[in-house]
Image: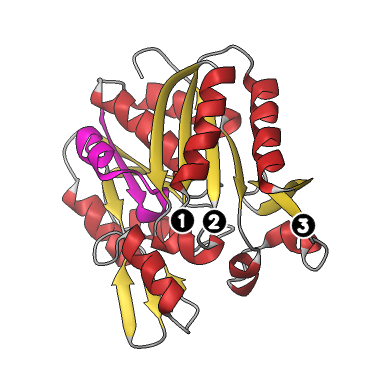
Amino acid sequence: MARVKVVTDSTADIPKELLEELDITVVPLNVNFGEDETYTDRETLSPSGFYEKLQKSETMPTTSQPSPYDFETVYRDLEEEDTVIFSIHLSSQLSGTYQAATLGAEEVDTEVEVVDSKRASYAFGIIVTDIARLAKNGADRDECRNRLEHLLQHTTVFFMVDTLEYLEKNGRIGKASALLGSLLKMKPILSLSEEGEVYPYEKVRGRKKAMARIVAELENIYGDQPIQLGMFHAIAADSSETMAADIREKLNVASEVTAEIGAVIGAHVGPGTIAVTITPAQENV
């Protein structure tokens, strides 16, 4: 039976303690402030350090993906007999990371299943941790693949940004571009399409009403079934916890993780963003 190992990239925004517990290998992206300052996501630039720097900088940060060789190196380091690697990554609509991983996988003998999550941040981090936990508990390739396919079909994500400025300037606004110039006091609830592109789910007047609307929609989708809850935010811990408390009250939360949105995703959504992702729970998760 082939042993399963799990690889992801730093935009999954998985807390360090979970990475260590579940033996998840991370390939980092980079964040650039101009031509002379380049930082490695979560290695040389923490989430808190990034937002502090962002607020002081006159330069809009840019991001860059790992090279195919970066992935090839990681896959070679994980090579063992009877091993299959599940390499799960940021939406290909938002980054070339998935394509780089695919090219890297072509250069190694080990079997690598490269997966376009069509999601971002902990919205796919929650999937990565689920599969890694399965693998740690001895699940084989088919069990992991079946669970992965189920999660990709049944994981929900909603998020709110303080401003669309960052999404617009970084070219990641997708179908939400229709909202520009027409918001006034409206607070857009955003999500990711089946193709992995940002789109406006609904417009609500005011942040509190938008948060309540998200919770109501999640309750409508998941009802009483046990769920895994992921809350993630960009220096908006209080708002994130307020929404989490409401979700705990109204949904059947089997497990919960709170994550910080790191520098790469933070460069595209900006400070003040709060997000929630939910996926069906499984036994022993």
Which comes sooner in the sequence, label 2 or label 3? 2
Taking 64 as reference, is 181 left or right?
A: right
Within 10 Å of the Cα at label 1, are there few (<14), some (14-19), or many (20+) other Cα atoms? many
Pair 2/3: label in front? 3
Q: CA distance from mark 2 to mark 1?
A: 6 Å
Q: CA distance from mark 3 to mark 1?
A: 36 Å
| Residue 203 screen position, x and y as percent | 78, 48
- The residue where tag 2 is placed is 92
Q: Which residues are magenta?
A: 1-23
Q: Residue at x 35, y 59 (%)?
A: 47
| Tag 3 secondary structure | loop
Q: Is residue 20 above or below residue 38?
A: above
Taking 184 as reference, is 169 left or right?
A: left
Q: Is residue 265 above or below residue 154?
A: below
Give the amino acid type for the residue marked by disc 2 in the picture: Ser
Give the amino acid type for the residue marked by disc 3 in the picture: Lys
Instruction: Choose between 50 and 153: the one closer to the eye.
Output: 50
Please say if the residues under marks 2 and 1 sit with CB atoms less than 8 Å apart. yes
Instruction: Choose between 119 and 179: the one closer to the eye.
Output: 179
Q: Quadrant of residue 211?
A: top right
Within 10 Å of the Cα at label 2, are there few (<14), some (14-19), or many (20+) other Cα atoms? some
- The answer to whether residue 47 is magenta is no
Pair 3/1: label in front? 3
Give the amino acid type for the residue marked by disc 1 in the picture: Tyr
